[in-house]
Amino acid sequence: MTGGIIILDFGSQYNQLIGRRIREMQVYAEILPFSTPLPEILAKKPAGIILSGGPSSVNSAEAHLIEKEIFEAGIPVLGICYGMQLTAHLLGGKVAKGEKGEYGRSTLIIEKYCRIFEGLPENPTVWMSHFDEVESVPEGFEVNAKSGVIAAISNEAKKIYAIQFHPEVTHTEFGDKILANFVFGVCDAERNWQLTNYIEKTIEEIREKVGENKVILGLSGGVDSSVAAVLIHRAIGNQLQCIFVDTGLLRKDEAKKVMENYGSHFDMNIDLVDAKERFLGKLKGVSEPEEKRKIIGREFVAVFDEEAKKFSDAKFLAQGTIYPDVIESQSVKGPSAVIKSHHNVGGLPEEMNLQLLEPLRELFKDEVRKVGEELGIPHHLVYRHPFPGPGLGIRILGEVDAEKVRILQEADDIFIEELYHDELYEKVSQAFVVLLPVKSVGVMGDERTYEYTAVLRAANTIDFMTATWSHLPYEFLEKVSGRIINEVKGINRVAYDISSKPPATIEWE
């Protein structure tokens, strides 16, 4: 799509937020690596370009730089954080390491209003995250705001703006207003991004691409694969063949619910594969988290490959790839330390020789959910919390066996049921139960028990890169704890995880 806003990625953790904020204005936004050649950027005919933040220093030998000509292309530019420092550096200003960093909330002092500050008060609160600072501005620029350091500069004649803070995060007051001022007031961008039109356009594209051929899709029951399945089914009907692999590591009654919701309600062809014993057999004796993930991933690929071969006339493999997956696969950050393998099960065999069909690859998660509701998927299914590909295999710490899976499924089902009952489910971003490889003494009736400890985990987040623990009511936690201990044989102690990310992760393994 042309005529939108291009965001050049310099490694900021907030890139996806910038894109989402702009799309919420019904303007198309696309995130590209900073190294994208200028002709490729210009070919997209953007209404404006945003230079994102990033961890690099413009004075470093490894600095992420761009072609200076981007500022001479006649396209409005907004630099954010590192993007401001880069703008100043490339155009003749001076950037130096500050005496101290500036992180978190800060008060902006607007000294001279420019177009992106129209409608703002003089001293809004903004969110800073930088150590380097602009010491002197390029020729033709003026200082618009400070926060102890130069915090905003502009060259209105050339429509180049730069700010040291992050307008895309919720901590910045009037951040959406600043972005809207740039997108509409400076770039004069069109409202060209509407999901209803996206559905209609995508259905036509699927029909044109697939023709009379068959499509295979690995249905997991999660939001992304389910929305992809319903969208493709809307386009080509029974030419779609779904494969659902029951690994034995899923939520309670998940296979039954998937067959009812998508097999019966949406009348899809679903091949249900019962592979519970196969997965549990492979996991026997294994307790190391990364090894469990790899075993589950390899086994899933093997099972899916075996089942897919039964449909030899299929020409396409559909996947629920969404835009954050695409962004992360081309991220400028490069290889990073492995905290854990990705929650989603890994890639499928190349030798399947199927063409890829990824109808959601341009959408953010919240957009996928909106598409799902437009397609008639029930609200409670579209807004389900994320569930990791390895499933309960990484929520059972230590070795996994059938009895531990049963215990965890029962406990988790109670927690989720009560969240729905008290209308708390959609107030938290992700909630689940973890089973620890620890037993403790308890008393039930007149008997002494020696059973497992369960941990409730609930977290709130915008982008899952950072998260805070959910402040659920004590009375609610007491009710859930009581039900789990009384109803789930095998658990006699329940704890609540009050760790934030970082330093903890959301999942335990």
Image (spheres, rainbow, N blue to C red):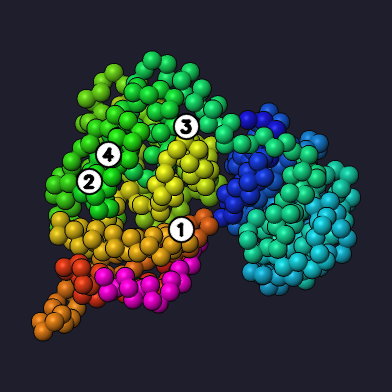
Residue 504 at least partly seen: yes
**Residue at horizontal 26%, vertical 70%?**
483
Residue under pointer 3: 359
* Distance from Cα at disc 3 to Cα at disc 4: 22 Å
Q: Amino acid at mark 1?
A: Glu
Question: Which mark is first along the chain, 2 or 1?
Answer: 2
Q: Amino acid at mark 2?
A: Thr
Q: Are marks 3 and 1 in contact (CB under 8 Å)?
A: no
Decide: few, some or many residues near mark 1? Use Cα within 10 Å; few <14, some 14-19, many ≥20.
some
Question: Which mark is first along the chain, 2 or 4?
Answer: 2
Residue under pointer 2: 247
* Distance from Cα at disc 3 to Cα at disc 1: 26 Å
Quarter the C terminus occupies? bottom left
Residue under pointer 1: 426
Give the percent coordinates (x, y) of residue 279.
Answer: 18, 47
Give the percent coordinates (x, y) of residue 186.
Answer: 80, 44
**Quarter of the image where one finds residue 184:** top right
